[in-house]
């Protein structure tokens, strides 16, 4: 429910990731989420329309969605807030790039170099403009802010990651969640 300035962005700590396909009723037909399917699930039969969207026999669309569970570091109020960043359509390439950035982080341990926990680093998310022959739109610009310096933020990220990984965080997608930039 908060608005952040796109040129300043927001600093987040990634705490979990999920990929699913969401079945939507098109807005012009009332909108709304019908179902969501975890990665690898059998999907309803569909065909691509002239815009490349997968459309089911009953006119619903199937949309790949990458869900990034994050803590927002509110720099002005020195507070943390749990949030979900859902990436679909043209945002998926930015999601993949961010996931690669996260997976490349390592930490030295007595047992050798190991993957760093995602919640050990922060990233700044801003918006930028992209375009193609179909028009212009805003999308994510994600930059590495480096390792966390505050142990309390690290602990909060670890706790949120544990909750997400246990499946205790559920998301009910609504048409309002899909807001063009």
Image (spheres, rainbow, N blue to C red):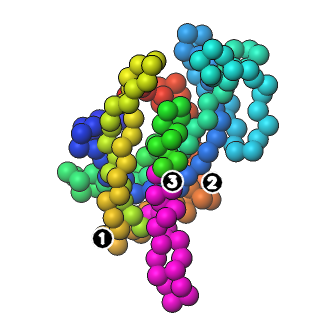
In the depicted structure, whether residue 123 falls above or below residue 64 = below
Q: Callout 3 environment at 10 Å: few (<14), some (14 to 19), or many (20+)?
A: some
Label at residue 149: 1
Label at residue 82: none
The residue most toward the bottom is: 110
Residue 56: image x %, image y %?
Answer: 73, 20
Left/right placement of residue 178 relative to residue 128 reads right
* Residues at marks 2 and 3, CA–CA distance in whole angstroms: 20 Å
Indicate the secondary structure of the residue bearing disc 3. Answer: helix
In the depicted structure, whether residue 56 falls above or below residue 148 = above
Disc nearer the start of the sequence (1/2):
1
Residue positioned 33% across, 64% down in the render: 146
Disc nearer the start of the sequence (2/3):
3
The residue most toward the front is: 133
Residue positioned 30% across, 47% down in the render: 10
Q: Which residues are magenta?
A: 98-119
**Residue on which the image places disc 3:** 99
Q: Is residue 99 magenta?
A: yes
The quarter in which the N terminus is drawn is top left
**Residue on which the image places disc 2:** 167
Eye-nearest disc, 2 or 3: 3
Q: Callout 2 environment at 10 Å: few (<14), some (14 to 19), or many (20+)?
A: few
Residue 74 visible at all:
yes
Indicate the secondary structure of the residue bearing disc 2. Answer: loop
């Amino acid at each position: 429910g908060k608005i952040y300035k796109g040129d300043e962005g927001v600093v987040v700590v990634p705490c979990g990731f999920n990929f699913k396909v969401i079945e939507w009723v098109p807005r012009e037909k009332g909108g709304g989420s019908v179902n969501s399917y975890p990665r690898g699930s059998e999907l309803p039969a569909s065909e691509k329309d002239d815009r490349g969207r997968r459309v089911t026999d009953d006119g619903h669309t199937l949309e790949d969605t990458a869900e990034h569970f994050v803590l927002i570091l509110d720099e002005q109020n020195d507070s943390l807030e749990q949030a979900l960043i859902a990436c679909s359509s043209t945002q998926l390439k930015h999601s993949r790039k961010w996931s690669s950035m996260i997976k490349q982080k390592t930490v030295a341990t007595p047992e050798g170099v190991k993957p760093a926990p995602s919640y050990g680093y922060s990233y700044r998310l801003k918006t930028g403009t992209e375009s193609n022959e179909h028009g212009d739109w805003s999308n994510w610009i994600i930059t590495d802010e480096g390792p966390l310096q505050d142990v309390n933020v690290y602990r909060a990220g670890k706790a949120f990651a544990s909750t997400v990984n246990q499946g205790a965080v559920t998301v009910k997608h609504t048409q309002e969640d899909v807001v063009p930039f």
